[in-house]
Amino acid sequence: MLAGGEGKRLMPLTADRAKPAVPFGGIYRLVDFALSNVVNSGYLKVVVLTQYKSHSLDRHVTRTWRMSTLLGNYVAPIPAQQRVNKSWYMGSADAIYQSLNAIDDEKPDIVVVVGADHVYRMDFSQMVQQHIDTNAGITVAAIRQPISLADQFGVIEVDTNDVRKIGRWREKPTDAIGLPDSPDEVLASMGNYVFDADVLRDVVSQDAQNDDSKHDMGGDIVPFFVNKGDGWVYDFNNNVIPGATDRDRAYWRDVGTIDSYYEANRDLIHLEPVFNLYNDAWPIFTSTSSSSAPAKFVHNEEGRIGQALNSAISPGCIVSGSMVEGSVLSPNVRVHSYARVLDSVLLDNVSIARNAFVRNAILDKNVVVETGAEVGIDVEADRARGYHVSEAGIVVVPKGTVITKV
């Protein structure tokens, strides 16, 4: 699992943590979704390759993802170690090259390589089966996206004789060609790959010796296989997940920006969720603090009713005589009397004091909104205070900030 990216576009949420460690959906971290997919697929020997600001990610993985040592299963974070030379990971392919000892120790036949920071459900065993059936050099998972978004992705143009084979690989094209069965769509790479283990070893070792390479899976390794006619694509649209609904089938989000992160959180709280966290047939695993009490809603008097509508409220939260609507509250958030929280994402231990108003905002951990203060109401005033404001007008307040009344 590749978890070493900086996540610059998610700043300030990634100021103190790796992107896969960013909290999401109240009780989860982004890495929980990829790990849950791998484990639910039946693959129980997992290494997580980390690099930037990895402390909170390492801590979450080691505390949460404890497998049966009796059966030899594990999820183990592996930080950049300079095992090969004095450089840190220079790209995703180099991260694998510098961690080949993990593959050598287990001697697998097949290696599944996945990114650690997307929100989706996927049964990788189905992709592995196609890889075996086609005798592919590399199999790349891809999702159908509108052709209008092609310039945001690595785009796969399928072979005219076999739609499972990659005919051409193009990086963020502005003149993409639609799919034969759907001219208005393209296949965009999801950043998930399957290799025979010996093939993976050979290709990343060769790539490491190439001074002209950027040592990137999508930029260098995939084109290598495509150019020799040995690149194959797995269409994510064909993946079957137990318990999936028509609404959330083939859901995938790259939460690489503040706006996509915000919208993905809101996808969870629709009456019929766009992404359904309540699918017990394919659960998303995580761990919450055992000391967190149940969420509580108190006071029921005119103008002072503790209530939450169309929202996800985590353990330990107290909504006290206040209104929460269209929002996601992480553990141990406090919303005090006469306060309002609308269309916002509040991370752990945020405190909203009396008569405060929060709207269209993301508040990182331990933010305090003092009595009568506002955030997200006047975007220009928020920007003048130094808070990040996204293209869509979402205000992001960094960890531990105290927001005072102006």
Image (cartoon, helix red, strand yellow):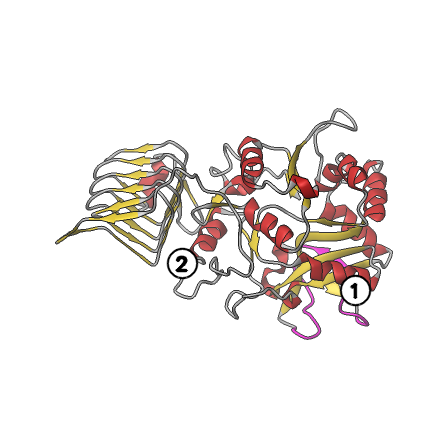
Left or right relative to 198: residue 24: left
Q: Nearer the viewer, residue 231 or 245?
A: 245
- Left or right: 374 with respect to 28? left
From the viewer's perspective, is residue 284 above or below residue 187? Answer: above
Identified by mark 2, the residue type is Ile
Classified by dominant secondary structure, the portion drawn in magenta counts as loop
Which amino acid type corresponds to the residue marked 1 in the rendered image? Lys
Residue that numbered label 1 is attached to: 165
Q: Can you give x and y, in whole percent of width and height, for residue 317 in the image? A: 33, 44
- First to last magenta residue range: 160-182
Marks 2 and 1: in contact by CB < 8 Å?
no
Residue at (33% x, 41% y) in the render: 333
- Residue 153 shows in the view: yes
Q: Nearer the viewer, mark 1 or mark 2?
A: 2
Q: Residue at x 53, y 46 (%)?
A: 30
| Horizontal side, residue 46 vs residue 400: left or right | right
Vertical comparison of 348 with 282: above or below: above
Q: Residue at x 54, y 36 (%)?
A: 63
> Element type at marker 1?
loop
Can residue 53 be seen at all in this image of the molecule? no
At mark 2, the secondary structure is: loop
| Horizontal relation, residue 322 to residue 102: left or right | left
Q: Which mark is residue 269?
A: 2
In which quadrant of the rendered image does the C terminus lie?
top left
Looking at the image, the residue that sits furthest to the left is: 302
Residue 58 in picture, x, y percent from top left: 58, 34
The one nearer the camera, 97 or 319, is 319
Q: Report the quarter where the N terminus lies.
A: top right
Task: Please state which of residues 168 and 397 is positioned toward the viewer in this rendering.
Answer: 397
